[in-house]
Image (cartoon, rainbow, N blue to C red):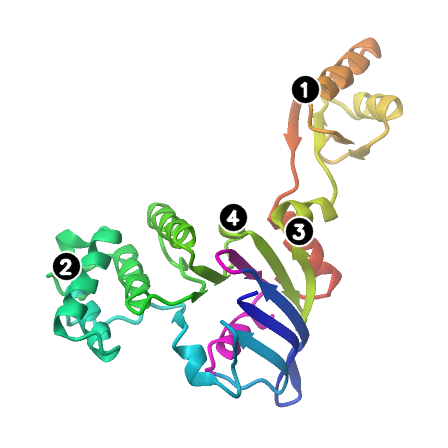
Amino acid sequence: MIVEVTGLRKRYGPTPVLDGMDLEVAEGSVFALLGPNGAGKTTTVRILSTLTRPDAGTVRVAGFDVVREPARVRGAISLTGQYAAVDAEQTGRENLVMVGRLLHLGRSGAAGRADALLERFDLVDAADRRVRTYSGGMRRRLDLAMSLVGTPKVIFLDEPTTGLDPASRTTMWDAIRDLVRSGTTIFLTTQYLEEADRLADRIMVLAGGKVAAEGTADDLKARVGGDRLDLGFGSVAALDAAAARLGGFPDRDRLVLSVPSDGTAAHLHHVLDDLRAAAVPPDRVSSHRPTLDDVFLALTAREGVAA
């Protein structure tokens, strides 16, 4: 495991922010950390990236202890925070070359690395423009490119697509997938649940400073139930008759009967045939699969945390 955390605790004054977290991240994977505001996501990233010391617990990143060997950890990681850390008065190329020189790549090495990253992140045409003329999506891509000048083993992305439009967000997702295909490990915090669903190999949900759940997206969705059919009716009488026939969960305000389903077409046909035989066919039918939104709301509500 490239990230290993055991018993992590952090307190600010009387308030425990992290209360005994354990986690492991496999090399070359995407690990997503979810949670409501104040759940401890950013604090976790700051501890893993050596910016904040833990109060208790053991934390190892790329084989190094974050407390005893912080310089070794920093040499193996990069961090992209919630806001693009770029110099708006320099060009995109100048930003990348600056980082390369700070990493002692030399003049030609830094220039070559900048050219490669400009190509990789589709910034060649804007390379010699001042960054203050860039769109938000272009700044974010440049910010991520700057994180890669030193070829890190682990990249921490703290809400990397906050404020981006859908097209720019999709471009960032493609860039993240490319990084993972090249063997880089991504530790991602996000409030966009679709982002975690699409990108993450494993997901952890924090609530109240503790781990509320961990697993694959499918594992977490299974915790809040399976597929269901929502059957709409034109009257309370029809709704009641259908509920008497099928069971399920009637909603009298919306005139909708929710019925557990296995998600197959065969089950849908069986339900419709059964209702037709009872002379109460539905006016409308929709299917619903659990989403990470369902998981998030269920888990945070269970912990008594406002999302």
Q: Residue at x 54, y 59 (%)?
A: 32
Q: Amino acid at mark 1?
A: Ala
The spot of residue 51 in percent (x, y) is 46, 82
Q: Which mark is residue 194?
A: 4
Identity of the residue furthest to the right in this view: 244
- The residue range painted magenta reads 27-51
Vertical side of 302 occupied by 223: above or below: above
Q: Position of residue 179 (x, y in %)?
A: 38, 54
- The residue carrying mark 1 is 265
Task: Identify whether 200 is placed above or below 114.
Answer: above
How far is mark 1 from mark 4, CA to CA? 26 Å
- Disc 2 from disc 1: Cα separation: 52 Å
Numbered badge on residue 295? 3
How many callouts does the rendering have? 4
**Secondary structure under the numbered disc 3 in the rendered image:** helix
Quarter of the picture holding the C terminus: bottom right
Under mark 4, the amino acid is Glu
Circle 4 residues within 10 Å: few <14, some 14–19, many ≥20: few
Amino acid type at mark 3: Val
The three-letter code of the residue at mark 2 reads Ala
- Asked if 162 appears above or below 65 in the picture, the reply is above
Quarter placement of the N terminus: bottom right
Q: Earlier in the sequence, mark 2 or mark 1?
A: 2
Label 3–label 2 contact, CB within 8 A: no
Kindly identify which residue carries mark 2: 127
Instruction: Specify whether 121 is left or right of 97.
Output: right
- In whole angstroms, how far apart are the C-alphas of marks 3 and 2? 42 Å
Query: 223 or 240, which is in the foreground?
Result: 223
Instruction: From the viewer's perspective, tell me whether residue 153 is left or right of residue 256.
Output: left
Q: Secondary structure at mark 2?
A: loop
